[in-house]
Image (cartoon, rainbow, N blue to C red):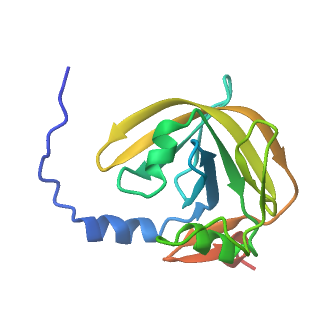
Amino acid sequence: MTSCVDVPTGITPELFRRVFRHYAAGVVVVTAEAGSGPAGFTATSLASVSLNPPLVSFALSTAASSWPTIAATDSIVINFLDAEQHSVAKRFATSGIDRFAAPTRWSRLATGEPLLDDAVGHLRGQIEHRFPVGDHHLVVVRVTNAATSDHTPLVYHAGAYNTVSQFQSV
């Protein structure tokens, strides 16, 4: 078994960030409740992991304000955003504010998790694993419920929120 040691890689955090700014990623808002009020954050790390069973993953910094809630809860909601929902993505990416205060419109699923009312789709799931990975945790979720509608997805690219159509050739 090998151990994880810090090995010089020749890549700085700045270069790593710059490389990923050229990679377009879908934008979602993850919401949860662990008994002290709703928490949520914008994520671009959502990935489909398995079809059977249906598993997804996302990464969250251990220093993030939402991490204590994700560390303590059993279930989460992943809210999908439409291309026009830049303001929602920005709000849930902003530190030091009440992200659920007006103008955010939200309600609770019958199971208690917070759901963004204007989300164009969502996944609800049970957290199966939390793996410490570097300065983040990789969270694996078994999807138990899903809803979607036709929409143009919001993507993050080059440090800004965009639409898929902005990248398509004419």
Is 112 placed left or right of 132 in the picture?
Answer: right
| Residue most extreme to the front | 36
Foreground of the two, 167 or 1: 1
Q: Position of residue 138 (x, y in %)?
A: 44, 41
Identified at 32% across, 64% down, the residue is 16
| Residue most extreme to the top | 1
Identified at 72% across, 74% down, the residue is 102
Foreground of the two, 70 or 35: 35
- From where the camera sits, is residue 168 visible? no
Is 103 placed left or right of 21 in the picture?
Answer: right
Identified at 64% across, 58% down, the residue is 28
Q: Could you tell me which quadrant the N terminus lies in?
A: top left
Quadrant position of residue 118: bottom right
Position of residue 64 relative to residue 101, above or below, is above
Identified at 78% across, 35% down, the residue is 145
- From where the camera sits, is residue 12 visible? yes
Q: Could you tell me which quadrant the C terminus lies in?
A: bottom right
Position of residue 2 relative to residue 114, above or below, is above
Q: Position of residue 91 (x, y in %)?
A: 60, 73
Quadrant position of residue 53: top right
| Residue most extreme to the right | 150
Q: Position of residue 161 (x, y in %)?
A: 61, 75
| Marker count (numbered) | 0
Quadrant position of residue 165: bottom right
Foreground of the two, 15 or 135: 135
Q: Position of residue 98 (x, y in %)?
A: 58, 68
